[in-house]
Amino acid sequence: MSVEEALARFERMAFAQFLRVRVAQVSHERAVLRLPFQEDNANQGGVLHGGATASLIHMAGTLAAWTGLDLQAEPLVNTVDLSVQYLAAALREEITAEALVLRRGRDIFFLDVTVRGAAQQLISKGLMVYRAPQYMAPMRLYSCPAPPATAPVKDSPPVLVPNNQDFTHKLQITTVSHSPGSVCLAMPYLSAYGDEQGNIHPGAVAALLDTAGTHASWSMVQRQGTRGATVGIQLSYPEVGQADVVAQAHVERRSEEMFFSLVQVRAVSTGHLVAMGNVSYRLLEGR
């Protein structure tokens, strides 16, 4: 693993050349990239397109991750998650992205990326999860990872064994129905779940969304010795309120270990969308 190898690999990235991205600094598990202002990277009015910013964030995170890999072994690498927050507009100016490896696991990198403008003002923040398996066998992708979402049987037993001591029980999350790759979970609205305005707290909703994605993943793999963990969640909150909610999750795609679920959280009384997002989950099956 070397900075030189990472740079050599980066120079082969056609899209970086297409956007005219420049490498400013690279060291072990750190990368700084620059994107000069160009009219064809901007919207009307000279504001940098959000897609260009996201591309720069991804490139910086990728390069930082590569500096911690043995690239001569030609590892199979791919992005698992990318989350971008846009804090300010970049108007006719060069932007700089600095990526740092927050944590490196056995084969997963967690990265933080900060984008600043010409005056060092914050433009955007990104969080990224990058994967580089330590084995050379091609990753198997299941083109039909889960059956289409169907009407699950009501009152079916929960996917995971209930634990009266865990956070799910504390929030009174229950299984409404499930089928392989799909679940519907319910959570009541209680005053204890309220925010400062009395609406259901976004954190409680996030916990429900995470749990739904987790259960949907486990519903497809239930073998002795299997262990799993959430890699990342992404959420949007279209509406707030004081109502019982249900979360419907469906695994849209999986590889041998990674499960990607789409989740919608709706108010029981009105059917209005309270939150929507996706959950990336990893399951390591026992042999």
Image (spheres, rainbow, N blue to C red):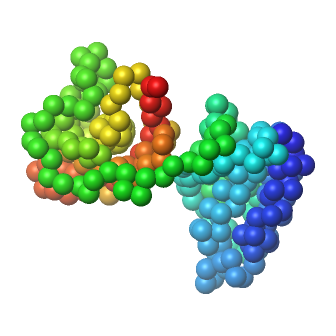
Q: Quadrant of residue 207?
A: top left
In the depicted structure, whether residue 90 falls above or below residue 193: below
x 35%, y 27%: residue: 223
In the depicted structure, whether residue 233 falls above or below residue 119: above
Residue 139 image point, x, y percent: 56, 48
In the image, is 53 to the left or to the right of 7?
left
In the image, is 58 to the left or to the right of 81?
right
Residue 166 image point, x, y percent: 31, 20
Q: Nearer the viewer, residue 49 or 195?
A: 49
In the depicted structure, whether residue 175 falls above or below residue 144: above
In the image, is 60 to the left or to the right of 168?
right
* Count of residue discs: 0
Given the current orientation, which residue lies at the most extreme right position?
4
Q: Quadrant of residue 160?
A: top left
Q: Nearer the viewer, residue 108 or 86?
A: 108
x 67%, y 37%: residue: 134
Given the current orientation, which residue lies at the most extreme top position?
165
Q: Quadrant of residue 180?
A: top left
x 71%, y 57%: residue: 59
Residue 29 shows in this picture: no
x 64%, y 75%: residue: 47
In the depicted structure, whether residue 239 falls above or below residue 179: below
| Quadrant including the N terminus | top right
Residue 242 image point, x, y percent: 19, 44
Residue 276 image point, x, y percent: 34, 53
Residue 246 shows in this picture: yes
